[in-house]
Image: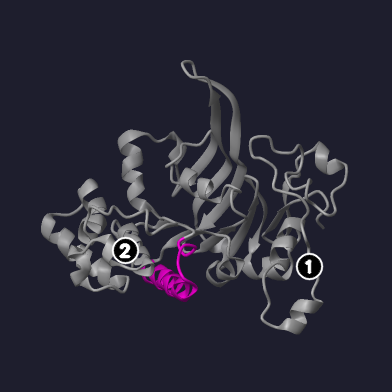
Amino acid sequence: MEKANANVLLHVENLVKYFPITKGIFIQRQVGAVHAVDGVSFDIYQGETLGLVGESGCGKSTTGRTVLQLYRPTSGAVNFDGVNLVSLKGEKLRLMRRKMQMIFQDPYASLNPRMTVGEIIGEPLIVHKVANQKEIQERISNLLEVVGLNAGFANRYPHEFSGGQRQRIGVARALALQPSFIVCDEPISALDVSIQAQVVNLLEDLQSQFNLTYLFIAHDLSMVRHISDRVAVMYLGAIVELTDRDELYNNPLHPYTQALLSAIPIPDPVADASRHRTILEGDVPSPVNPPSGCRFRTRCPIAEAQCAESRPEFRELGPGHFVACHLAK
């Protein structure tokens, strides 16, 4: 995709989300905060897929939910289609939600077991009052067929389906209001490997069919490479590298990205034995009390004194290649 001519659908600037830590039985007082998302900025262009990767607990899912205003941000701006979502409340925000949807991580927990598949998929249409009963039934049948399921499944309950089928139902629900932007929050991590490719191929087919834009959150780097146009790497609440997919995998500049990529298994035993592995020392610091300066410095193999003194600027080192590292060149 030619970024110079592409339209920016989503512009996120200095997004911050802290979760307060309180103490006390009768009088609750704040004694600290979890720095879940801390100064995240990125753009997503119309029709592209931005992959967001990082280890568990780094703030990927919180970023996705804060972008959609499921969590209200502590500070920062989220401009979607020219509108700052952070400033919207009540009815105005509810109307904007029709254009933004989410596919959740766990297909076993995200579907109401007391509702039929038809009721689950049709609920967004009822809530937003965009169709009458006959139109809703037609739309449910059409959506089930679009995601590769039998239209006759509408009267069944979620427990009657496998994990892959449930995730397809979740995809159908997300498509019900014909959104332009979907946050895919690790939509394949709870599925068998054999089913993962089916769901990813479905997402790609739907993207080309309906001109969808995705924020694809995952920790499986090989799958992210397959589906994404650009990739953002996240560590402890901050994005440390952002660039095109092939550039990231061929020329990683941040030490954390290099360590992540070196951990991907290679099916060739000879090539795997000869390549350089970066083994990170220690544990991920607590987001309650993150390190000063660079977040990654406590585990970085090349850290210097300046890394503890100031937070590295998120700067462009090559065309469209952004890195937050004092020492990257």
Mark 1, other Cα within 10 Å: few <14 / some 14–19 / many ≥20: some
Q: Earlier in the sequence, mark 2 or mark 1?
A: 2
- Residue 314 image point, x, y percent: 71, 48
- Residue 300 image point, x, y percent: 80, 52
Tell me if residue 275 can be seen: yes
Q: What is the C-alpha distance between the residues marked 2 and 1?
A: 40 Å
Which residue is located at x 66 percent, y 40 percent?
A: 286
- Residue 108 image point, x, y percent: 37, 58
For residue 2, above or below residue 15:
below
Q: Please indicate whether residue 269 sits to the left or right of residue 204 in the image.
A: right
Q: Which residue was labeled with disc 1?
A: 277
Which residue is located at x 42 percent, y 42 percent?
A: 70
Q: Please indicate whether residue 267 sits to the left or right of residue 108 in the image.
A: right
Seen from the viewer's position, the closer of residues 25 and 181 is 25
Disc sitting over residue 169 in the figure: 2
Please provide the residue range marked out in magenta: 187-210
Which residue is located at x 39 percent, y 58 percent?
A: 180
Does the stretch in magenta take in 147?
A: no
Does the stretch in magenta take in 190?
A: yes
